Image (cartoon, helix red, strand yellow):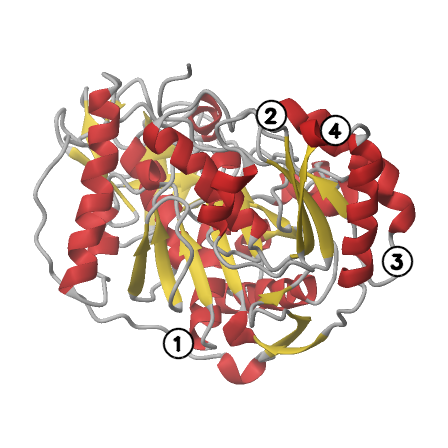
Amino acid sequence: MQEAIKINKYDNVAVALKSLSQGQVIIIEDNNITLLEDIPAGHKFALEDIDQGSEVIKYGYPIGNLSAKVAMGEWVHTHNLVTGLKEVKDYTYDSVETVSDDITSQKKDFFMGYKRKSGKVGIRNEVWIIPTVGCVNDIGRLLAAESKRFITDEVDDIIAYAHPYGCSQLGDDHKNTQKILSGLINHPNGAGVLVLGLGCENNHIDELKKCIGDYDEDRVKFLVCQEYDDEIKQGLNLIEELVMYSSGFKREQIPVSELVVGLKCGGSDGYSGITANPTVGGFSDLLIKAGGTSILTEVPEMFGAETILMNRCANSELFDQTVTLINDFKQYFIDHEQPIFENPSPGNIKGGITTLEEKSLGCTQKSGTALVNGVLNYGELIHNKGLQLLNSPGNDLVASTALAASGAHIILFTTGRGTPFGCPVPTIKISSNSELSNKKKGWIDFDAGKLLEDISLDRLALELYELVLDVASGKKVKNEVNGYRDIAIFKQGVTL
């Protein structure tokens, strides 16, 4: 494996691909760089002398400005590099042509999924228990445990999703809870759904039904616990009915154009923007070429790379929506008197990421090269195909839940640090480095670190594409095998 990489021809830093030592000579584009200090794996070092105040270039774009002069071979990180980002700003639409190569003839164009009566397509045949309010979380867990005896060969699992909300919320905060829960209730991976209420919450079932919209009474059942002497007995009766209903579905051939995949990263490191995120971007391009849909979220982790996405918008209307998406999220930080550019996290910094623009330039590579074809509000369902941008924060659980609620069948989650969690849909963990993949075999599903070996980006993206279709056809990923399933809702308002 090579020792360091210069990612873009315009870069003035390189990234160490393994721990490097002071005095070591690294060859970059036929230039000999003598390291002036130890460089940790995933971290940056200067390829030339760079003056104080000058821009540091990585991925071909500025990632910040130097707070002190740096000599060739010197470590570039938080001690001498600061963000160059500003707050809310104006943008100009400068549309670009997207260019990508074509390996579509090598890949499958279908998966084995479930056609629902609504016309939607699912990739799992599960029964979900969705509480309207946190007060009934433990009842939901008990019902899920006791109803396992009803599971048939045709039903994958019975799962209860706990959350702390549904009461004492006001305004948009309350609406957020209703939108996310409604998105999950309507999600086609849930063949049958029990909506579990208490009875006195402000998110009571009659109100939630208005947000759910039309529903199949065989598929969605409701239980208000305060209305029954024995809510467990009644709940088990309803779940047994849902299992019988769900058992009627069989896997059948579904076009890839029906597949929706969410794109997310967390616990990133210095390799994430070199291996895992570009691999996911290559996958996203393949999926979109086949007529499918991918959703990119984590709006704060677009800051610093937003113009790349804006200029890939399919039209000026989408450009305007993307500008609003970015500036409104910045205003959210300002309204709460918090710094806009607090990112990266301690784990990101330890892994070699210094500034938010550096993190964002790596993060947005998950979107590939496709045109932006839609901009979604938080909790909004997708309504067309192609690449979508979704309004959500960067928090792993909140963003992944938002992706699922907007219609993602699967989440591709890249990580350089590792994380075990899973959201309501299969959450494929993609490691940025092979060391993590080998260390955390119980968490990681796909090793993108192989990109640093003898494999091309096209080939690795195709391998990931094939894995995604296998998962869509029933292959379980690590979070499902481990039973790790969670939801988290974006909390913005006051609590009564």
Residue 134, disc = 2
Return the residue at label 4.
139
Q: Which residue is mark 1?
A: 101
Res. 278 image quadrant: bottom left
Mark nearer the N terminus (4 vs 3): 4
- Give the mark toward the camera: 4 or 3: 4
Specify the amino acid type for callout 2: Gly
328 relative to 155 in the view: left or right: left
Q: CA distance from mark 4 to mark 3?
A: 22 Å
**What mark, if any, has residue 166 been given in the picture?**
none
Q: Which residue type does callout 4 highlight?
A: Ile
Give the residue number, with chain letter if any, for mark 3. Answer: 152
Tag nearer the camera, 1 or 4 = 4
Cα gap from disc 3 to disc 1, whole angstroms: 45 Å
**Counting other residues with Cα less than 10 Å from the Cα at mark 3, is it few (<14), some (14-19), or many (20 or more)?**
few
Instruction: Describe the element under mark 1 as helix, strand or loop.
Output: loop
